[in-house]
Image (cartoon, helix red, strand yellow):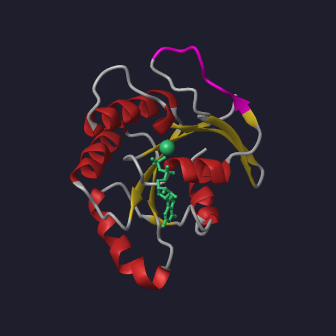
C-alpha cells in the first residue's frame, strides 16, 4: 500500500489549506467513527512518479482533552503511530510558540521522518529572516511555503517523497 503522510500542527497554521491544495481524488471520508469528525481528512496525492495518502490530523477530534496542547499531542501521536512521514507545519506570522517546541520534541523522539514546513510566507522578502527561527526546533531545515498562494509547495513535496 501507499506511504502515509500526516500533517500535524497547531490550529490555524494552515493544515486544511495545505491539505486542500494537495488533495487529488478523494479516497475516503471518515464517518461514524467515535472521536473523528466528518471532515475529509484523507486524500490521494501524486507528485512526480510517487503517490501517497495524505492525512490532515486537524480533522481528527481527540476523545479527551480539549486544550490545544493535549489535542496537538494526541494528533501528533496518531501521526507517529500511523504515518511514514510527518509534515509538521508552523506559522511564520505567529512565530515559534511553546507548543510547537513541545510537539517538535515528541516528533524528534519518535524518529519518524519529519518535514518541517513554515507556512504563511506570503512574501519571501518580508518573512524570510523569520523562517530561520524555526531551525531552533531541532527537527531540520524549515521549508517556507504559502499554502494560500501555493508557493513553495513543489519544494515541500520533493522533501516528502525523498523519505519514501
Ligand atoms: P488549520 O486550523 O491548521 O487547518 O488552518 P486553516 O487551513 O483552517 O487556516 C487557518 C487560517 O489561516 C485561514 O484563515 C486560512 O485562510 C489562513 N491561511 C492558511 N494558509 C495561509 C497562508 O499561506 N497565508 C496566509 N496569509 N493565510 C493562510
Ligand atoms: Mg483544519
Image coordinates for residue 71, horizontal then vertical, percent: 33, 33
Residue 151 falls in image quadrant: bottom right
Q: Is residue 61 left or right of residue 48?
A: left
**Segment colored magenta:** 27-34
Q: Residue at x 38, y 40 (%)?
A: 111
Q: Determine the residue located farthest toward the left in the rendered image.
A: 98
Point out residue 56 in the picture as x, y percentages from the top left corner: 53, 39
* Residue drawn at point x = 60 percent, y = 19 percent: 31
What secondary structure predominates along the stretch shown in magenta? loop
Q: Residue at x 24, y 45 (%)?
A: 102
Q: Residue 142 at x, y = what percent?
A: 42, 64
Q: Is residue 65 magenta?
A: no
Position of residue 151 relative to residue 67, above or below, is below
Quadrant (top left/top right/bottom left/bottom right) for the C terminus: top right
The answer to if 31 sits in the magenta stretch is yes
Work out whether 116 lies above or below 38.
below
**Furthest-bottom residue in this view:** 125
Which part of the image, by quadrant, shows the N terminus?
top right
Locate residue 98, reporting x and y percent: 21, 52
Q: Is residue 10 left or right of residue 39?
A: left
Q: On the rendered structure, is 160 left or right of 91?
A: right
26 w.r.t. 114: above or below = above
Disc tally is 0
Amino acid at each position: 500500500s501507499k506511504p502515509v503522510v500526516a500533517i500535524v500542527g497547531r490550529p490555524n497554521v494552515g493544515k486544511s489549506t495545505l491539505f486542500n491544495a494537495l488533495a487529488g481524488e478523494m479516497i475516503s471520508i471518515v464517518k461514524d467513527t467515535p472521536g473523528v469528525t466528518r471532515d475529509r481528512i484523507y486524500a490521494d496525492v501524486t507528485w512526480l512518479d510517487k503517490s501517497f495518502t495524505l492525512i490532515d490530523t486537524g480533522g481528527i477530534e481527540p476523545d479527551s482533552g480539549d486544550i490545544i496542547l493535549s489535542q496537538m499531542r494526541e494528533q501528533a501521536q496518531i501521526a507517529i503511530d500511523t504515518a511514514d512521514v510527518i509534515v509538521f507545519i508552523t506559522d511564520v506570522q505567529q512565530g515559534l510558540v511553546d507548543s510547537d517546541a513541545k510537539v517538535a520534541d515528541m516528533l524528534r523522539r519518535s524518529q519518524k521522518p519529519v518535514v518541517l514546513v513554515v507556512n504563511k510566507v506570503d512574501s519571501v522578502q518580508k518573512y524570510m529572516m523569520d523562517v530561520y527561527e524555526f531551525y531552533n526546533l531541532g527537527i531540520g531545515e524549515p521549508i517556507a511555503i504559502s499554502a494560500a498562494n501555493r508557493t513553495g509547495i513543489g519544494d515541500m513535496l520533493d522533501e516528502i517523497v525523498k523519505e519514501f
